[in-house]
Image (cartoon, grey):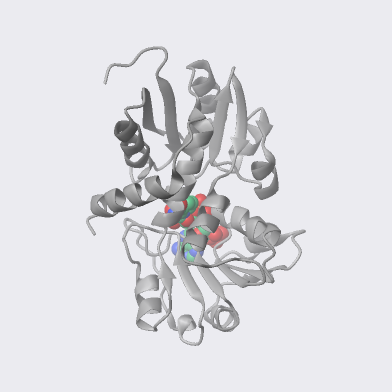
Amino acid sequence: MIYSTKTLKMAVMGDPIDHSLSPFMHGAIIEKHGYDALYIPVRVAPDETERFAETAAYMGFCGFNATMPHKIRLLDSVDQLDEKASLYRAVNTVRIRDGVLTGSNTDVDGLMAALDGRGIRPDGQKIMIIGAGGVAGALIRGFSAAGAASVTVLNRTLSSAEKAVDGIRGAFARQMTLEHLSETAAGSDIIINCTPLGMTGVEDDFRDLTFLDDTRAFVVDLIYNPWQTRFLQYAEKKGLQTMNGLPMLIHQGLLSFQLFTDYSLDIDEEYKYLYELCKERLHC
Ligand code: NAP
């Protein structure tokens, strides 16, 4: 590929960033359509969010994705927030036009599209979220706005869960103990792991998964590497319906790509294309 000043420049920034599947995914779309565009991974230290955002604008990038630990910091490092980023209080997508950075969020719509693909609608559902970090915070607001009956957040650090649910109607915080996990799981319709527990390269994992013994919930892990975490394996053995993090990752990526480039994609077609490619890439 020969690049020019017209080439659309995009990136994903984070720390760590090596594990990210986004460059592969966006690169595959660029290659498939022959777009004059590039998408690169950039390792950006936690305290360099603003510096990267300014540099991307200066270098004429049309946008970039953000992953850990920049999603919250970007709220203050962009020029404006769109409706989604304002509502979900996290930025995973930044669109740049004429040097103006607009923060957006495609994580929540990405998960909602992934659930929809499995015939699941969040309205009226009791949601259990494990973890209270950046992505959990956005999902709590997303499920609440989508009309969930309740959103219960269980976290290792109770104060973070309390902060995450603060001011959100129908959202509750609990300490992440086996007793609370079991009690909440039994009354939930959808359970989502929003922690890195069980992820490749992370030593920690759920010590006891018996909290899934008495639930009939649809079980989601936002992790896609490994393809099936112990958490999902256990749920599946119990006969529960499960979904890993890949459908969400692909949907959020396609939404971001459209925001960066203004290209209109056939989402169903591109989703199927990327799902098979990514699955193969993850050696499944
Ligand atoms: P984050 O902001 O760093 O939050 C991590 C959360 O996990 C915190 O609540 C933290 O609890 C908890 N946690 C970390 N280590 C733990 C441990 N050893 N035991 C118990 N709890 C622990 O991360 P994030 O951005 O929200 O991302 C969370 C996960 O979602 C990651 O695995 C990420 O890869 C995945 N993700 C997937 C997608 C996708 O498209 N599939 C999109 C975004 C994120 P404390 O508050 O106690 O520290």
Answer with left or right where residue 44 lies relative to residue 233. right
Q: Quadrant of the N terminus?
A: top left
Q: Residue at x 38, y 71 (%)?
A: 232
Q: Position of residue 63 (x, y in %)?
A: 50, 29
Residue 271 placement, left or right of 66: left
Is residue 230 visible in the rendered structure shown here? yes
Where is the C terminus found, in terms of image quarters?
bottom left
x, y percentage for residue 144?
A: 69, 61
Q: Residue at x 69, y 71 (%)?
A: 149
Q: What residue do we see at 67% from left, 67% from top?
A: 148
Residue 277 higher or lower than 14, as above or below: below
Counting from the top left corner in percent of width and height, residue 174 is at 64, 72
- Residue 106 horizontal/vertical position (percent): 55, 45
Give the farthest residue toward the bottom.
214
| Residue nearest the observer in this picture, 54 or 93 | 93
Q: Nearer the viewer, residue 214 or 110?
A: 110
Position above or below: 181 against 247: below
- In this rendered view, identify the residue nearer to me: 152 or 148: 148
Residue situated furthest top in the rendering: 5
Question: For the point 58% across and 60% down, which residue is it?
Answer: 132
* Residue 194 visible at all: no
Q: Quadrant of residue 171?
A: bottom right
Q: What count of labels does the image hold?
A: 0
